[in-house]
Every structure is written in C-alpha cells, then in structure tokens.
Image: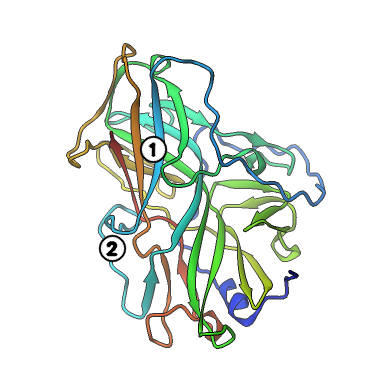
Amino acid sequence: MKTIKTPLLLALAITSVLAFNSCKKDKDEEPTTTGTTTPPFVACTPATAYTPTSATTPRLIFKFKFDSTQVRLDNVGNPSTVPPGNAAQSPIFNLMSQHYIELAGDFDLVGSGEVLHIGTQTTAGGATAIEYCASVQSAEDSVFFSIPLDSITPGSYKWLRVSLAYQNYTITYKSTAVPGGFGTGTIASFIGYKTYIPGYKINGVSYQPSAGTGGAGNHNQGYWGFQTTVLGTNYFADGQAAGTTVPNPLFATSPIPAGSCLVTGEFVDNTMANSPLVVTGLETADIVITVSLSTNKSFEWTDSTPDGYYEPSVGEAVVDMGIRGLIPIKN
C-alpha cells in the first residue's frame, strides 16, 4: 500500500484550520534556547501502556474517559452550542497523552498546588519541548498515570489540572472522490506548548512533518497531521495552526492564566456531586480518578454547503478541534 503526500482534494482542504487561543507554557515548562539539531527521520511509536513505579502501597490512579454526551463547554467554561453557519461532529477518540498533572485547592496558583507529574522534555530541537517519542498515549479506560498515595502531601484538593499534549481521533467526511460518498480519516493533533517531533505514525504508517511546517524538530502547539485511505492508497496532509481551543474555566477560586494549556475540573463523586479529593497518606486502598473529557461536537467546521456533513473537497474550513471540558470523577 503506497502513501501519497500530495494530498487528495479532500485532505488538502483541511489545511485551512483556524485557531482560537494560543497555549501559553505552564510553570516549569519555560524553554531555554540551546541551539538546534537536524534529526534523522525517525517515526517513533510512543508507549501505549503506562508503567508505574514498583511501590506496592495504595495508589492514586488516573484513567481517561472520552464522552460525547458530556456538556460542551467554551474556552471559559460556559455551555456552548455550535454557532449558525457551522456544523460539528463528535469524533471517535483513539488515544490521548498528557504532560502535566496538578492537584489544587482554592486560590492555588498554577504550580503552587501538588504537582504530580511533568512529562519528559528535550532540547534536541533547540528550545525545551515535550519529547513526543517519550510520551505515553492512552486509550479510554487504561491507566495513564499513577502515584503512591503516601507520596502526596496530605490535604483536601478541589481541582484537577491536566495539560493535554497529543490526541488521535477518527472523523467522518463527505467527498465524491470516495466510493459511497463518505470516508473516515485520522487526525493526529499535537496540543502541548511545544513538541519535539522527529517523525510519527498514523495507523502504523510513518510520516515526517512536511517542510512547509518546519520539518522534523520542534513544533509549536497546534501542529497536526491527517491521514485517510481511499481505494488502498494512503493520503496524508499536515499543517501548523497558531493554537487550538482548550476549555479553561476561570473559576473564581482556582485561578488559571488566560490562554493556558491546562484543562481544569472540579472533583466530583459517582453521583456527580462536587466532592474534594482528600488524601491522608494512610489509605489502605487505591483511589481511581476517571478523567472524563468532553468530545461533544468537538470537531467543528464552516458548513458552507450547508448539509451538516464535513466536506473538505469543497473548501469547508475547520474552525475547532480538541476537547470540550474535563470532569474528574472519584471512583
């Protein structure tokens, strides 16, 4: 099966991505310029299974849930509908990775809460960036991070802050070039503050960022790749948006910098009632947190036809991609 990087008309039109709020760097992620390198074409495959430390004490465990029925939020945490003239679909999320996890109480500034995790970073591309090849890409219901409870500062934590780094999902599009008129494609979206990408794979096929996006190396938040297969042939397109929309509720008691990468949610119990996460350090059983991410109509485009179907071959432009909110549920 061959791959064509000169995109099919349906793939080419996806380059007209519009970005909203650019992502600012989280605390402890400030870049340092150390020069540049020219890496070889290495299409790495990040791990898809998280490996915990060997500690056998009870743990705080995090798992993703991708929920297309969860409330759809705008970038300040208000319920949001698709505006007139646009259409949207709820993609099928395949994988997600994160770079930063923090527990916070009321009035804790970013970084002043309990920082549980900062992912691997590298200066191989010059400025400090997330090392894509060292990340862990997690499917729904699989553990994406865990930590012994007795290593966490005891306290009551109201908020969970997570900086998402990469997402992989499947969309449906309409095109006369596809038998039957409809096809599916996969989007690889790099949504961390900056990511070092020597090469990557979509559905097992190797790709390198195109010269038009800067080639292999560091890529600012908003780089994406798109792949579809038509009659046995792979088609690939990629692009660099200035940013991507991430819901950042500006809760009065949990200050989040405007434009931050961090997605924030208030802890709830299984009844969806607000309930802080209490850690004593003396727990005798694991605590599992389901990080429920809203995928409710998260892929949005200008419906110029209009017919409610995404048709890149007629120039319908993507205006939003990503997730639409976070709810951390204690199980």
How far apart marks 2 and 1 lie (CA) works out to 21 Å
Disc 2, disc 1: CB below 8 Å?
A: no
Q: Nearer the viewer, residue 74 or 143?
A: 143
Quick check: 235 left or right of 281? right
Quick check: 154 left or right of 119? left
Q: Position of residue 220 (x, y in %)?
A: 61, 52
Badge 2 crowding class, 10 Å Cα cut-off, few under 14, some 14 to 19, many 20 or more, is: few
Q: Quadrant of the N terminus?
A: bottom right
> Which residue, as the protein is rendered here, is positioned at the far top?
282
Colour convention: rainbow
Q: Nearer the viewer, residue 222 or 237?
A: 237
Secondary structure of residue under mark 2 = loop
Q: Is residue 123 above or below residue 277?
A: below
For residue 296, what is the image quadrant? bottom left
Q: Amino acid at mark 2?
A: Ser
- Residue 161 got which mark? 1
Q: Nearer the viewer, residue 25 or 169?
A: 169
Lower sequence index among marks 2 and 1: 2
Residue position marked by numbered label 2 in the rendering: 80
Q: Position of residue 89 (x, y in %)?
A: 39, 69
Q: Quadrant of the C terminus?
A: top left
Q: Amino acid at mark 1?
A: Arg
Q: Is residue 189 above or below residue 156?
A: below
For residue 78, what is the image quadrant? bottom left
Q: Is residue 129 above or below residue 181?
A: above
Number of marks: 2
Q: Measuring 53% from the left and 21% from the top, which residue is drawn there?
A: 53
Q: Is residue 18 above or below residue 306?
A: above
Q: Measuring 37% from the left and 80% from the top, which residue is drawn there?
A: 308
Secondary structure of residue under mark 1 = strand
Q: Measuring 39% from the left and 14% from the top, which residue is drawn there?
A: 150
